[in-house]
Amino acid sequence: MDHLEALEHQSLYILREARAKISRLAMLWSMGKDSTVLLWLTRKAFFGHIPYPLIHIDTSYKIPEMIQYRDRLARELGFELIVGQNTTALAQGMNHRRGRLVCCTALKTEALQQVIEQHKFEAIIVGIRRDEEGSRAKERVFSQRSEKSEWDVVGQPPEFWDQYRTDFPPGEHVRVHPLLSWTELDIWRYIERERIPIIDLYFARGGRRYRSLGCAPCTASCASDAGSVAEIIDELVATRTSERSGRAQDQEHSHAMEKLRVKGYM
Amino acid sequence: MSQLAFIVVGHVDHGKSTLVGRLLADTGALQEGRVEKIQRICQEQRKRFEYAFLLDALEEEQLQGVTIDITEARFRWQDRDYLVIDAPGHQEFIKNMISGAAHADAALLLVDAKEGVQEQSRRHAYLLSFLGIRQVAVVVSKMDLVEFSQTIFDRVTDDYTPVLADLGLRPVAFIPVSASDGDNVTVHSERLPWYHGPSVLEVLQRFPVTPRGTGGPLRIPVQDVYKFDDRRIIAGRIEGGCVRVGDEVQVWPSGHRARVSSLERWPPAAAPPTTATTRQTVGLILDYPLFIQRGDVLADPANPPQVSNFVAANIFWLGRAPLVPNREYKLKLVTSERTAEVFSIARVMNAASMHVEHGKAELAQNEAGEVVFRTARPLVFDPAAAVPETGRFVILDGHDVVGGGIIQEAEELYRRSYRHGLPKSAGISPMQSGVTLADRAVAYGHKGHVVWLTGVPGVGKSTLARYLERELFDRHVKTFVLDGENLRFGLSADLGFTDADRSEQARRAGEVARLFRLAGFVVIVALVSPFDADREYARTLVGHENFTLIHLEARPAILRERDPHGLYSRVAGGAAVAVPGLSSPYEPPVGPALRVDTGGESVQTSGARILELVLPSIGAPPLAGRASDRGRPGRLLRVVDGPQRRREVDDRRGADGAPQRTRARGDVPRRGCRPHAPLEGARLQPGGPRRERQADRLRRRRDRPSPRRGDLRGGEPL
């Protein structure tokens, strides 16, 4: 079994554990490369079926192609799509100029929290990876959240071997992270090997491409000529720039992501 | 593309994160954004550049200058990928260190040259050993603070070596390092001219990625059963062995059997898979709709797991509240969950001082101990030495994971139920033997077994038992007869002939037979044993596949004529004597393996029929004349000869080359992964095609389920 195969089987195992242990389960889907792989793994784990709804948190500031892609795929694959939006905050004019961390918390974290409360979800599957940034490197596969979605980063439970913590007191919920051990390069190599269709914002147009997708005002493209998955892989092998360097909210504060994430950010 | 995952452990402040940061910097693994970010943070805090901050990403960690949680980082060095796991050294964060070590192939143990071996140096070493990480090297850090003194380095080496040796850890190297200056991290340092060993990176390069063997018996703990469409898919991950389409699998704890009719996959492939191997997730469709649920284990019928209400394990306890008796815990083993209670605690060890205490009734936080748990429903498991993945579990108190356990070999304890009350002694735990059942089977050329002869007095049990004993003995099979009458002179001298005493007599005979079986003997029990429940209890004590029940019968006229003890004539004469089958109850067995009419056939004929049944079960050749007749004295059977078995052991060697304790699986035929793979392990000697067919037939008959464990199709009783 090669490295990618080992990662794949580990993720399939985690997805099946989540489905077996948690009745009210949903998956966060942002149409990016990681959640695209996650959706593919879901269909693999459940033999072509998608046995839980997909949640998209729509900040209303997403790159327009992403929304078109989202609706097309939902029609084609026929899964249940839940679109979450913090309409109250938007009505009050929330945007990134009020502070990126404030905006992220309102339009993403709070919107997700609203969906969780409305649908009484006990667990959300999220495609984060340890190699993305420092606080995500500290995550568990099954990660506990308080009633208010808060992450007690210092008091995390142990994970002995593959014995994930799948029991939670009522009220608390859990984030399930099947891609935690994958790297950005693993994701692309897997996309290449499995020939997974992917949104074309990742491919270079006019010498620029997106390496990480988010809200239009806070996501910068990078200079690149990579027009295919194979070229993206070559580019990543050579680069020393970090994946999220185009994501403005990360640069807002030294511990921006940690601060966002303890409050329930993905 | 192989990736080596290694963890860096050691006492708090001995410089783990600094070493990791240095490794990342020296191998060019740092992404631009990361370094700038740390530079900015260090400026904010008015500190000089801290390598440790590359890993200690949490604000709390950086403010306190201490690692709280594990973190991972990756680097590539000379065509190999490394995943480094930085673990906290603080006692409070032991649980985090465990989470980090759970997936490591190797470990670097750090010891500060100035401080020497400390509490966490010992506890972390214990935990590495506990979690099964055997590839270790010791890094003696902060050598710059002791002026690169060889004397100090040697002292640390001398102090730590015996501690590690006690834990079964043999480090491949002790490396003197100054991580902040980079001495001996990637290349040799001029400042340590007396050191001629490898640098840290050189040691890492030499660690092999732990080979995950695909051998061993098949184990698929069931995760779920899917009925999304018209297929009924059993989903799980193969934790040991491999499976092919067409293989028969046995489901535990029920014992039902079915064949694998397909391996499902999405997206559908032109050529669907026909085999799957260890660590692969699978979706199986079986040829018969057995009732299967999450937590069941699919296994190779020739090599079943243990199924027991008792499990003996080494426990490491993390709970704030101690592990105590008379409290309900949850035991989680792969996908099965059982309510469990402490049955006994023995030999409690303080993992920091390595001090062992006896007679403690509880296990406190960060202590390790030998604990026997009793589960409400039978647990399906293996000793960890045989199948690591199904040989370990976690303990939950409420919703919290509070401990981990590694299951020991404890044949004396497993497959045992207590029909007559639990053991009265407190604080007992099974003592492990270095000689396994398989070792004995290899040495003796056969496995242990119990042949239980039941029947009314005078039916000929002792005669047949003595005949079988001679026949087996002459075939060089280790054998012994437990005769009911003989037991009454000693072990059962306190018993008479009441129903209760006959029941107790059967219990004792069953327990002794169990011991003889474990010792590798073929035990012949010649005992009236009038009650079905007693005989079936003996079967559970010995294990279904190790137990052959024979019912001896004869017409009443023949019994009266033989009457060796004059019992029948005394009853006829009106004496109040309890003779089972005549003046007291005798329950004929419902499904004996064989019925023998001692009035209708000779001892030789009956004996041959029994041997035909028993010899294949113990891995001995079927009836083919005595060994001496074939001019082959000594061992009867080619049970995995030396090289084969050595290979098995080699596969499990640690980096230090020391064989890790393992149960040789030579005592039963093992299935290969490839189609048409030759059977490995014990093989019967060639006895001609006809004889092999006969042996096959017998084996099939033997493997047919007994009524109590019969599959839903209803196996016909023999």
Image: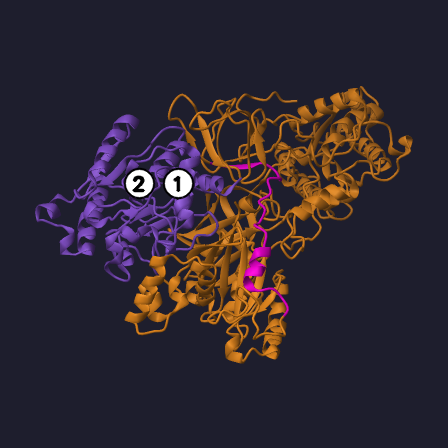
Chain colours: A purple, B orange
Residues at marks 2 and 1 touching, judged by CB atoms closer than 8 Å? yes
Mark 1 Cα-neighbour bin, 10 Å: few <14, some 14–19, many ≥20: some
Q: Label for residue B665? A: none
Q: Give me the residue at 35% from left, 54% from top.
A: A241
Q: What element carries label 2?
A: loop
Q: Which amino acid does label 1 sit on?
A: Glu
Q: What residue type is labelled 2?
A: Ala
Q: Label for residue A204? A: 2
Mark 2 Cα-neighbour bin, 10 Å: few <14, some 14–19, many ≥20: many
Q: Give x and y (percent) for residue A6.
A: 49, 42
Foreground residue among A74 and B122: A74
Task: Provide the residue span drawn in magenta.
Answer: B196-222
Instruction: Please say whether residue B214 is one of the residues in the magenta stretch.
Output: yes
Q: What element carries label 1?
A: helix
Task: Look at the image and tell me whether residue B134 can be seen.
Answer: no
Give the residue at the far left of this rendering: A92
| Residue A199 picture quarter | top left
Which residue in the protein does label 1 denote? A231
